[in-house]
Image (spheres, coloured by chain):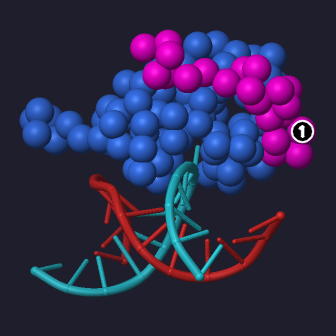
Chain colours: A blue, B cyan, C red
Amino acid sequence: MKPETLTFFDKVYEVAKQIPFGRVTSYGAIAKYLGAARSARMVGYAMNGSSGKDVPAHRVVNRNGLLTGKQHFDGTNLMQQLLESEGVAVKNNQIQNFKTVFWDPSEAL
DNA sequence: TATGTGACTTACC
DNA sequence: CGGTAAGCCACAT
């Protein structure tokens, strides 16, 4: 693992790991914090490779608080259940009170 | 080596 | 106010 291999991709993991319990954030927020506001897709793609890591991918959703990535989890409702387990209300793939549980890395970090 | 794809977001008709 | 296009960049084929 050479330092040159560290990319935007890896930085996403570092930020995602710092998401507090019971909070969520958006792909764009992470991307923006990393200085690549237009690379939100990469954040999502990074989550795709978060399997086996300590990255709480279920705490990362799209800008609308919609669980767009739930289909990448094993079950169909696994992502939602994980969030509800942390006290985050989710209904129909949509996080309730999203604005309330939203965690902005730009403010926290 | 080249082409296609994607867990998004913003900007423009 | 809505749909479409473009941009981002790493990874898979």
Q: The magenta stretch spans which residues?
A: A89-109
Classify mark 1: helix, strand or loop: strand
Which quadrant of the structure image shows residue A97?
A: top right
Query: Depth check: A93 or A36 in front?
Result: A36
> What amino acid type is highlighted by mark number 1?
Lys
Which quadrant of the structure image shows residue A4?
A: top left
The residue at 37%/25% (across/down) is: A14
Quarter placement of the N terminus of chain A: top left
The residue at 47%/48% (across/down) is: A40
Crowd tier of the residue under label 1, counting other residues whose Cα lies within 10 Å: few below 14, some 14–19, many 20 or above: few
Query: Depth check: C11 or B13 in front?
Result: B13
Tell whether A36 sits left or right of A79.
left
| Residue A51 position within the rendered picture, expressed as x and y whole percent measured from the top left | 48, 39
Compared to residue A96, the image places residue C3 above or below, namely below
Compared to residue A83, the image places residue A37 above or below, namely below
Which chain contains the residue that carries disc 1? A
Residue designated by label 1: A91
Q: Is residue A61 magenta?
A: no
Compared to residue A67, the image places residue A95 above or below, namely above
Which quadrant of the structure image shows residue A59?
A: top right
